[in-house]
């Protein structure tokens, strides 16, 4: 069974194995399983072995950092100095980033080993990882099924033990949904908690980086390394970062948990509802005080989200024009031809759809009806949560309406695909932190529950998840083929 | 076109001025803003619009914009917002320009201009907003290809938008000069038009004199001097009047001024204009500006041209015109004040006359700025002092001035080496006068017969004999005495 980050740290500290040894193990597992799963776009073997050697030296000198020697993977949307950063797109297939994202830099500084860059929906646009220029990713629990998206490669890699942990980004559920579908633990922090510098932007007011791992305790370690103010990101928060691991052992006795009735209404697969009820019972047994709450504007979150995210994306993706980097069409006859063909050839269908919708929403004459209206609704959705947090400490519900679906099942129906994000996107609109943790199975596929906390209360999310994981072992289960 | 026809029309002009702010680094990155570096050597990952980079606002640019706002007595909101202006162009790396749309940093303000001596007009300023400059495209360096230099990309600009309050090219130039002077006084812009640090676009329309509605405007671009601004506007006004007189209509469009042909040419019409899809930039938080921030900036403002002018009139007794001229350009005022500080307070008017007369003329002829004047302010002070203490006459002073300009040294040195010291010894003057009277008996007769103006002839003769050095006042008095 693959090790947790916590176990790797202990083993390295005790000298049971070296970072070089386990890095070679992971690289071997990647070589064996990646052809099936397609989790990785790039495997940085030489770099990983070099970093592992440096980590071993650091460990030997007693100068280990938080994650020294721990082999991880980065979503291929974080810029990595000297390594291709494709964002899952043909348009960046030849793009080698000239600098490290803040998140990558922090992991490097703490001594983590980068195994490679993980597959994703192109520009993080998608909920199934079927929108990648590098092909879809398979769900380790059932390889005919999707792993979720957009950070599907990271979630599948952790689930299959091809990396001890991985980074992801979450604009509308892109960490939590694949975490749920792959049976791993993932956290989307408060907007501003993790620097966005070097994260290729999709929806700038919604994007937030976070980790995937095999447990809440592991997520606490990874978030510790990622979080904190960054002068290069104006939206990054100066709020102090607490010691997430230190508060994990606090119980949930008396913790007030609210269940939004709108999250348990029509649309939720009843078998998933049953799994979630069982998890709620466990938390109640641990002393949590469970009550029903209401988030009345939940239904507005999908249209609101798609207007804002696409509007921002249409502008964010303008820089991919074939002029300075990335794909450029062959023999352009003039400037317009250069733009049209470079972008036409470089972007996939879903990305083009979103650029068009976003451009439309910002156009003269439509701006008020779409973008401005969406901003008003966004405030209402935010207010719903603030009202709820007057009476509860945490909110709990499903992460997704159903378990992983078959590859190809929704590719012709974008709206049904967008509905996969119904429970996750309102958090991005509000900027709140949330996490998904495994709570059982339906049809042999993992089910995730979602915990939502107030701003900068990640410690409470991690602590509650950790307490649940002390009385359950769903998070430690590994698909047979990869155990 | 007859003047009559012209008189039926009124032109309406508004200006958009882009002043490059004199910050050391760019508005959203740490790269240098210095002019003239090798292409693309002053463009960092942020300026290149690399994937994943983010803008971080240069607070100095904000302070400079507020300085301008305070100086034009403008409304400054507590919150200012950056917006993205979306359009594709190769020298615009991100595919959008970070600018301001709603909630610009500087709101409504105003400034006074003097288009001619004794005239005064208040011109409204609609707004001034911060934005980043684009790079430069070059089309003549590589065959079949265009080059892009992104050194300028991200340079902070303050775009100052006036109300359509100007009614002639002359007023527009007076306004542009006034803003130019102000930004230099505030030390927020170097004002260099050749390097593009100060650029003017003009919105020009015409209407019949009895009409108070605005006509359709054309926007004139590519104007890089005040002279061209005047010519471009005048050309455009005539073009529009001719067009309408001939039964045509003015279309809303952007027109480029061609200084070589002295004409404006259509660049793009409204139909081809971009929909910029402005929206608030999610990468930048709203800028919060407190009353204390504004108060601090106000307290630190230098003396502004209007205040300076009033002080020159009230305290130094200068004329309105001279005070206006001295303060119009900050460097001139600095020169004057340096001279004044060293000199006698009674010399203010003298110094002003020299600076605005001979010195300005010589500088203009040589194409020099006053900061590069070969005659420094202490040198000018010495010259004026020698006139005041009767060492030389005003006429000789011009000779000394020319010699100083040629680099022959200071006034005292030139007076000594050229022997220009004024003759004030009455005995010496009497000798000269006696010689002249003896040599011109006919003229003496005429004078004595009552022909007063012959006196001038005698003065001239005596001055000639003294090679200009005799004190003219003494010559006059003694002459009258001797001719009686």
Image (tube, coloured by chain):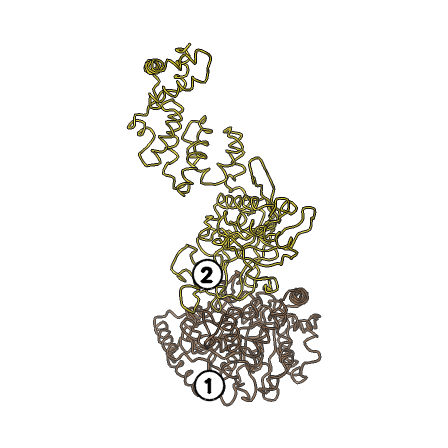
Chain colours: A brown, B yellow
- Is A70 displayed left or right of A253 in the figure? left
**Crowd rating for badge 1 (residues with CA inside 10 Å; few <14, some 14–19, many 20+):** many
Q: Who's the residue at 59% across and 37% down the image? A: B119
Give how far apart the Cα atoms at labels 1 and 2 are.
Answer: 46 Å
Depth order, front residue of A295/A368: A368
> Looking at this rendering, what residue extends furthest in the top direction?
B484
Depth order, front residue of B441/A430: B441
Q: Position of residue B22 (x, y in %)?
A: 46, 50
Q: Using the image, tell me which numbered label, if any, was put on residue B324.
A: none
- Is B473 displayed left or right of A276 in the figure? left
- State the SS at label 2: strand
> Looking at this rendering, what residue extends furthest in the front direction?
B442
**Crowd rating for badge 2 (residues with CA inside 10 Å; few <14, some 14–19, many 20+):** some
Chain label for disc 2: B
- State the SS at label 1: helix
Q: Using the image, tell me which numbered label, if any, was put on residue B136.
A: 2
Evaluate whether residue A483 shows in this view: no
Q: Where is residue A113 in the image (x, y as percent from the top left)?
A: 41, 75
Please tell me in which quadrant of the rendered image residue B254 appears: bottom right
Have a look at marks 1 and 2 and say if they share a chain.
Answer: no
Depth order, front residue of B470/A242: B470
Please tell me in which quadrant of the rendered image residue A17 appears: bottom left
* For residue A243, above or below residue A41: above
Residues tagged 1 and 2 counted as in contact (Cβ below 8 A): no
Q: Position of residue A40 (x, y in %)?
A: 47, 81
Q: Position of residue A328 (x, y in %)?
A: 47, 74
Evaluate whether residue A413 shows in this view: yes
Depth order, front residue of A153/B353: B353
Q: Using the image, tell me which numbered label, if any, was put on residue A34.
A: 1
- Is A313 displayed left or right of A331 in the figure? right
Chain label for disc 1: A
């Amino acid at each position: 069974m693959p090790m947790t980050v916590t176990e790797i740290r202990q083993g390295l500290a005790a000298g049971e194995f070296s970072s070089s040894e386990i890095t070679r193990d992971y690289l071997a597992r990647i070589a064996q399983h990646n052809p099936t799963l397609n989790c990785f776009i790039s495997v940085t073997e030489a770099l990983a072995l070099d970093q592992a050697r440096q980590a071993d030296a650091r460990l030997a000198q007693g100068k280990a950092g938080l994650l020294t020697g721990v082999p991880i993977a980065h979503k291929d949307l974080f810029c990595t100095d000297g390594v291709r950063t494709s964002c899952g797109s043909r348009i960046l297939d030849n793009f080698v980033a000239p600098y490290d994202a803040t998140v990558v830099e922090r992991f490097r500084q703490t001594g983590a080993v980068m195994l490679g860059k993980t597959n994703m929906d192109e520009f993080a646009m998608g909920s199934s990882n079927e929108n990648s220029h590098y092909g879809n990713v398979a769900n380790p629990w059932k390889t005919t099924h999707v792993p979720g998206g957009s950070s599907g490669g990271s979630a599948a890699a952790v689930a299959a033990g091809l990396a001890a942990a991985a980074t992801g980004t979450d604009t509308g559920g892109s960490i939590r949904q694949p975490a749920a579908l792959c049976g791993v633990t993932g956290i989307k922090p408060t907007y501003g908690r993790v620097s966005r510098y070097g994260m290729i932007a999709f929806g700038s007011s919604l994007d937030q980086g976070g980790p995937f791992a095999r447990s809440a305790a592991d997520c606490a370690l990874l978030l510790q390394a990622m979080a904190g103010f960054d002068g290069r990101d104006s939206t990054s928060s100066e709020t102090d970062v607490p010691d997430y691991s230190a508060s994990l052992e606090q119980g949930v006795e008396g913790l007030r948990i609210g269940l939004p009735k709108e999250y348990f209404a029509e649309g939720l697969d009843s078998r998933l509802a049953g799994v979630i009820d069982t998890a709620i019972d466990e938390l109640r047994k641990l002393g949590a005080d469970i009550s029903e709450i209401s988030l009345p504007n939940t239904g507005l979150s999908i249209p609101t989200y798609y207007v804002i995210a696409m509007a921002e994306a249409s502008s964010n993706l303008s820089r991919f024009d074939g002029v300075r980097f990335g794909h450029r069409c062959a023999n352009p006859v003039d400037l317009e031809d250069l733009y049209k063909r470079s972008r036409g050839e470089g972007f996939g269908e879903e990305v083009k759809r979103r650029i068009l919708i976003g451009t439309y929403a910002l156009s003269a004459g439509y701006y008020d009806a779409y973008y401005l209206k969406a901003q008003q609704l966004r405030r209402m959705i935010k207010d719903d949560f603030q009202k709820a947090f007057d009476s509860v400490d945490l909110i709990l519900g499903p992460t997704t309406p159903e378990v992983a679906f078959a590859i190809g099942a929704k590719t012709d129906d974008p709206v049904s695909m967008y509905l996969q994000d119904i429970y996750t996107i309102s958090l991005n609109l509000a900027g709140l932190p949330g996490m998904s943790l495994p709570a059982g199975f339906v049809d042999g596929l993992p089910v995730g529950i979602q915990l939502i906390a107030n701003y900068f209360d990640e410690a409470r999310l991690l602590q509650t998840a950790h307490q649940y994981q002390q009385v359950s072992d769903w998070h430690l289960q590994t698909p047979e083929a990869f155990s | 076109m007859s003047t009559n026809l012209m008189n039926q029309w009124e032109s309406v002009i508004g200006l958009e001025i882009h002043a490059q702010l004199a910050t050391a680094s760019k508005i959203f990155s740490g790269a240098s803003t210095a002019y003239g570096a090798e292409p693309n050597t002053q463009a960092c990952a942020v300026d290149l619009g690399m994937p994943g980079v983010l803008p971080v606002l240069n607070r100095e640019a904000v302070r400079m914009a507020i300085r301008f706002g305070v100086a034009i007595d403008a409304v400054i909101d507590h919150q200012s917002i950056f917006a993205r202006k979306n359009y594709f162009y190769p020298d615009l790396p991100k595919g959008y320009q970070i600018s301001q749309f709603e909630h610009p940093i500087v709101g409504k303000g105003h400034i006074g201009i003097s288009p001619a001596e004794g005239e005064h007009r208040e011109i409204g300023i609609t707004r001034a907003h911060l934005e980043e400059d684009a790079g430069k495209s070059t089309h003549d360096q590589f065959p079949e290809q265009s080059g892009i230099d992104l050194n300028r990309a991200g340079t902070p600009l303050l775009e100052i938008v006036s109300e359509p309050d100007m009614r002639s090219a002359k007023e527009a130039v007076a306004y542009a000069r006034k803003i130019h002077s102000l930004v230099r006084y505030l030390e927020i812009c170097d004002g260099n038009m050749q390097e593009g640090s100060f650029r003017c676009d003009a919105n020009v329309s015409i209407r019949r004199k009895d009409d108070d509605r605005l006509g359709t405007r054309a926007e004139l671009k590519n104007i890089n001097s005040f002279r061209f601004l005047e010519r471009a506007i005048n050309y455009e006004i005539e073009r529009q009047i001719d067009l309408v007189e001939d039964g045509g209509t003015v279309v809303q469009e952007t027109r480029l001024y061609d200084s070589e042909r002295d004409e404006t040419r259509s660049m793009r019409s409204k139909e081809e204009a971009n929909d910029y899809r402005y929206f608030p930039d999610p990468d930048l938080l709203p800028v919060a500006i407190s009353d204390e921030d504004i108060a601090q900036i106000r307290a630190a403002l230098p003396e502004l041209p209007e205040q300076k002018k009033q002080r020159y009139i009230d305290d130094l007794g200068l004329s309105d015109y001279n005070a206006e001229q001295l303060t119009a350009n900050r460097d001139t005022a600095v020169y004057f004040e340096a001279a004044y500080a060293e000199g006698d307070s009674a010399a203010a008017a003298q110094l002003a006359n020299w600076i605005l007369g001979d010195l300005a003329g010589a500088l203009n002829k040589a194409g020099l700025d006053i900061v590069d004047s070969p005659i420094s302010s202490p040198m000018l002070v010495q010259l004026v002092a020698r006139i005041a203490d009767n060492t030389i006459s005003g006429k000789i002073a011009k000779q000394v001035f020319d010699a100083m300009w040629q680099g022959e040294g200071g006034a005292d040195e030139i007076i000594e080496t050229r022997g220009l010291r004024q003759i004030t010894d009455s005995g010496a003057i009497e000798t000269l006068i006696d010689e002249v009277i003896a040599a011109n008996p006919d003229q003496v007769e005429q004078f004595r017969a009552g022909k007063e103006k012959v006196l001038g002839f005698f003065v001239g003769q005596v001055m000639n004999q003294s090679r200009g050095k005799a004190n003219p006042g003494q010559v006059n008095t003694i002459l009258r005495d001797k001719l009686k």
